[in-house]
Amino acid sequence: MKETVKAYGAKSATANLEPMTIERRDLQATDVNIDILYCGVCHSDIHTVRNDWKGSTYPVIPGHEIIGRVTEVGTEVNNFKVGDLVGVGCMVDSCQTCNSCQHDLEQFCENGATFTYNSPDKHLGGQTYGGYTTSVVCDQEFVLRVPENIDPKGAAPLLCAGITTWSPLRHWKVKKGDKVGVIGLGGLGHLGVKFANALGAHVVMITTSPEKADDAERLGAHEVLISKNQDAMKAHANSFDFILNTIPVGHAMDPYLSLLKIDATMVLVGAIEPMKEFNGGSLVMGRKRVAGSLIGGIKETQEMLDFCGEHNIVSDIEMINMQDINDAFERVTKNDVKYRFVIDMASLK
Ligand code: NAP
Ligand code: ZN
């Protein structure tokens, strides 16, 4: 029997999120049924609801930072058992056979990964529905094991904000002693700071918000650079080995590129939209690079969660009830969150 469950979603780009009911598919042989305990609120949830990236299909039921407990497993599930603490991130399926999938890069599946929400649903038709619900059915290959020693509420944001910042730090081989800049102290940025610190880097928080300086240092930044202060920016010119850029909207890149050393890279993870024009000279003078990165593969996500278990890293969160989601969206948009909202799904049950 398909299960009908409570959810919160938006019926149009301008609508508030409201209560609705949705269906979850029958459990397939390799599926895991998860009772959702907590779900983080990612800025991507807002971009998708507001149709900022176009292509949203309504209703949109967001949520891709899911933590829960296994309530049921299919006949061929061998990795999980009832009661396990698990997570689901931004993807729920991929072809598993293409070159990307074979190399643990399901996010770049050549046949199109199935994202947790707003992706074509292979089982039920229509589009997938995310974690702003009481339960989710997911193939075991896309279910992550969450270390039992970390706080499950703070672990929720690891499933997207965590892997999105971990993956580029690892791919670009950030190491002890590197000078690493993290731009934007939000959900992604605050985890970027924690990870870069844990990897032994000299971490500089690059922010537009001077009032966040104390928090940045508490989270693990060794220095804080206020990006609007041109003298301070000049003092850091040509000095960074790596910069992780989490700014959620198009922006001028030249000021940030000026911070990179020769051959160093700035990785964009936030702005999935046109950037302001930038000067070719900002790259040419110093053989600098701009790159991008999308979440991370399933294997890498598990490695990140295990690292968090070993180093006791979780997100700094503010818990909300499901009913407060519209206010939370408003506050994220106004840059007023420390540093991730997490929905207590008990409020919907
Ligand atoms: P967030 O919590 O809103 O944080 C973004 C931070 O960026 C803000 O706290 C602010 O930090 C800074 N900022 C905001 N507007 C800015 C502007 N106009 N100019 C300069 N800085 C600005 O958002 P998030 O959840 O971390 O997500 C960040 C972006 O990453 C979003 O666009 C999201 O959709 C995207 N994302 C991408 C991936 C991926 O796989 N690539 C995955 C998840 C999310 P300060 O106050 O410190 O300046
Ligand atoms: Zn996200």
Image: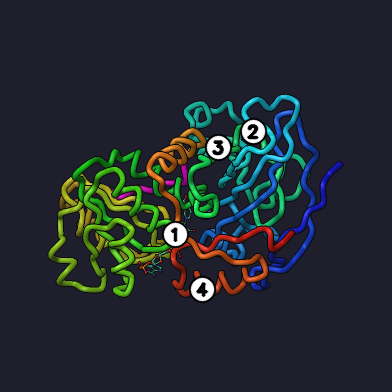
Q: Which mark is residue 140?
A: 2
Which residue lies under the disc numbered 1? 316
Label 2 or label 4, whichever comes before in sequence order: 2
Residue 289 screen position, x and y as percent:
27, 48
Image marks 2 and 1: residues in contact by CB distance under 8 Å: no
Q: Secondary structure at mark 4?
A: helix
Residue 105 screen position, x and y as percent:
48, 35
Marks 2 and 3, how far apart at CA: 10 Å
Viewer-side label of 2, 3: 3
Residue sitting at x 41%, y 53%: 269
Residue 195 screen position, x and y as percent:
35, 48
Marks 2 and 4, how far apart at CA: 34 Å
Viewer-side label of 4, 1: 1
Label 3 or label 1, whichever comes before in sequence order: 3
Marks 3 and 1, how far apart at CA: 20 Å
Q: Which mark is residue 145?
A: 3
Q: Nearer the viewer, residue 221 or 269?
A: 221
Which residue lies under the disc numbered 4? 331
Label 4 or label 1, whichever comes before in sequence order: 1
Residue sitting at x 33%, y 70%: 212
Q: Inspect the image, locate mark 1, and give the three-letter code of the amino acid beneath it.
A: Asp
Q: Is residue 293 magenta?
A: yes
Image marks 2 and 4: residues in contact by CB distance under 8 Å: no
Bounds of the magenta segment = 289-296
Q: Quadrant of residue 97?
A: top right
